[in-house]
Image (tube, rainbow, N blue to C red):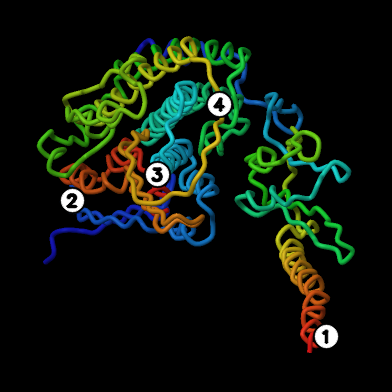
Amino acid sequence: MKKTIQIPLGSQHISLLEPIRFKFECENERIIGVDADVGFVHRGVELACTRSFEFKQVGYVVARVCGLCAITHSLSYTLAVEKLLGYVANDRIKYLRMLMVELDRIHSHMLCLAHTAENAGFEALFMQIMGDRELVMEVQEAISGNRVQFDYISIGGVNRDLTSDLCDLIRKNLTILSEKMEILTGLFDNNWSLSLKYKGVGVLSLEDAYTYNALGPLARASGLATDVRAETSDFPYEALGYTMILESTGDIHARNFVRLREIVNSITMCQNIVDNLPIGEIQEKVKGKPKGEDIIRIEAPRGELFYLVRGNGTNMLERVRIKTPTFSGIPAMMEVFKGSQYADAPAILASFDPCMSCTAK
Amino acid sequence: MFKSILEAFKNLFKPVRTINYPAQEITLPSGYRGLIEHDHEACIYCDKCEKVCPPGAILFFQKESGDKEYRYNPWLCIYCGECVRACPKPQEALWQSETKQQSGVKEDSANEGWFVWEEACKKSRETYAVAKKTPKSKIKSEEPLCVS
């Protein structure tokens, strides 16, 4: 007689934000095998970038790959095209782009923390974090003029400048947020019922993180020192107070703590950017058409985002390849599920912060 | 643990953080990216906005007299402001307002109506191009006759 039982999770499930299907092979309550299917929201973005849109418009198209990290996608694409055109942005543009990326990281991490709390059964904490997240959303809306689709970065610069009123708003909101983060850190650290669901659950060991090529907060929670911000020199991260955040235990608790501490680090960086903003033009003319092939790597909130752009000297690109962090992290994610309880699966899944519309694009 | 219980009790007496939306208005921040507006008088009809628009929400209908008519689909527009940046006369001929677009209802025929317009604009250009070419080609065909 067969001893295992198959339990599906998804593609529609109350704990999921986006469609993904897991097929768990369970032995009593313990998961021993996992099968994942991610292609439910395929939209053909890559093909559309090469068939329907000119290279100057593609930046706005790829921003619609993901709602949460819209700015990271458009930034990666823009940097790749600017490399092909031989254009190097001035310091002010770099700082403004960095500011938006870091704000994006803060609100994305907060959403993930909220969801992990919700999936662990702490509904009130979910509400609280989402309420605090509004502080960042407000800033982003004031800077870019829209709440979700920022459309802030274009080839040759950024679309809007930072006025002194905006600087004051950023300083004010980020100060309130950093106070709130202290309370949240205490809550995540000391709350007894949360620790039951988090500590020692969904462990990814350091060797597994190496073997399965984990990336982003998932890898850093296991102690694997990988961060594109430290590895590339596209942006002056070191000068603005960037520190690599590492935890060692690799469970959900460690992942939450990597995110919490990264938020605090990003807040410091944003404050530094606003205080030390260089003077310069925000939009420069870039001439020419992309010819040749180039790649770019950017640290998105969930890990390394990879872009390949190939042009042939015309308005239409030949190839745009997007490799998103969730896609690269799936083998590591599947490894974490093995050996844990089925009841913990939603909380573990939320702690990966999966972004399915990114992955399937 | 006791801290969070205390916090929960405190929260009972704190003001509500959500906005009572339909009764209470949401204030948009200044500089909100809203609808694109167009001035017929100031526009020089260079078609630059039409070319750069990522979703193709701006179209020009070519009339036979040579004039053009500006057509804009507020539901297709992504409010990126690329057209305003491409415009040779920004703020005069084309500018981005802070009005928020209302959601479309069936009577607006946001899709079907626009498809008809798209087709009509494309056709109007073709017919205009043909009409412009015909006299020239006639002249050309007459010329060799004159020579011979």
Nearest to viewer (mark 3 / mark 2): 3
Residue at the spot of label 2: A28
* Element class at badge 3: helix
Q: Which one is nearer the viewer's eye here, B104 or B143?
A: B143
Q: Nearer the viewer, residue A7 or A185?
A: A185
* Pointer 3 residue: A84
Q: Secondary structure at mark 4?
A: loop
Side of A163 where A305 appears, left or right: left
Instruction: State which chain disc 1 sits on.
Output: B
- Give neighbour class at mark 1: few <14, some 14-19, many 20+ (Cα, 10 Å): few
Where residue A151 appears, x then y in whole percent?
56, 38
Kind of residue sitting beneath label 2: Asn
Q: Are both tags, 2 and 4, on one chain? A: yes
Quarter-of-image position of residue A214? top left
> Given the image, on which type of amino acid does mark 1 rest?
Cys
To which residue does mark 1 refer? Answer: B146
- B118 left or right of A317? right
